[in-house]
Image: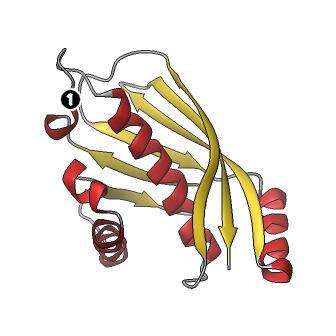
Amino acid sequence: MTPTDSSLELQKFLHEKIPLSRAMGVQVVAVNDTELTLCAPLEPNHNHLGTAFGGSLSALATLAGYTFLWIALGDRDAHIVIRDSTISYQKPVRGELRATCLAPDPKKLAKFLKIFHQKGKSRIKLTVLIEENGETAVTLTGTYVALR
């Protein structure tokens, strides 16, 4: 897959503003209305067993949610933080790390955006999946907050 200009611009933004993303080798793979996918190579993100390090999986999943919300929000003066999250590691990742943030229900996203524009603060729950060979290896559910 050839990266688009917009995905390369987004990747550059992540590498500049969140240096860990550069160290991990994060790349923007897909951006559309239903999901956002980031990937990272196994090599700089492996543990002593040769599988993906749990901290790298967590960081990539958290970053996928952050990036999805940053795009959906469209307000470049807003600050996005993760308030809380739960992560479940169902199986080891032995290859490329690939995290996909699924778009929330359109009504919930619209409500989030409306509250943000009215009050300058809003929160929303997002789900991020890390899959390998068509099977879910990691699930992160996080509450993200946008602040003006």
Relative to 126, is 66 on the left or the right? left
Task: Find numbered disc 1 in the image and state the secondary structure of the residue it sits on.
Answer: loop
Q: Which residue occupies 29% across, 55% down?
A: 20
Q: Which residue occupies 20% across, 41% down?
A: 41
Picture quadrant of residue 7:
bottom left
Q: Which residue is labeled 1 in the image?
A: 46
Picture quadrant of residue 93:
top left
**Quadrant including the N terminus:** bottom left
Relative to 41, is 137 on the left or the right? right
Residue 27 x, y percent position in the rendering: 28, 57
Dot 1 amino acid type: His
Residue 79 x, y percent position in the rendering: 58, 73
Residue 91 x, y percent position in the rendering: 41, 15
Picture quadrant of residue 45:
top left
**Quadrant including the C terminus:** bottom right
How many numbered circles does the render carry?
1
Relative to 5, is 84 on the left or the right? right
Residue 43 x, y percent position in the rendering: 13, 36
| 117 vs 50: above or below | below
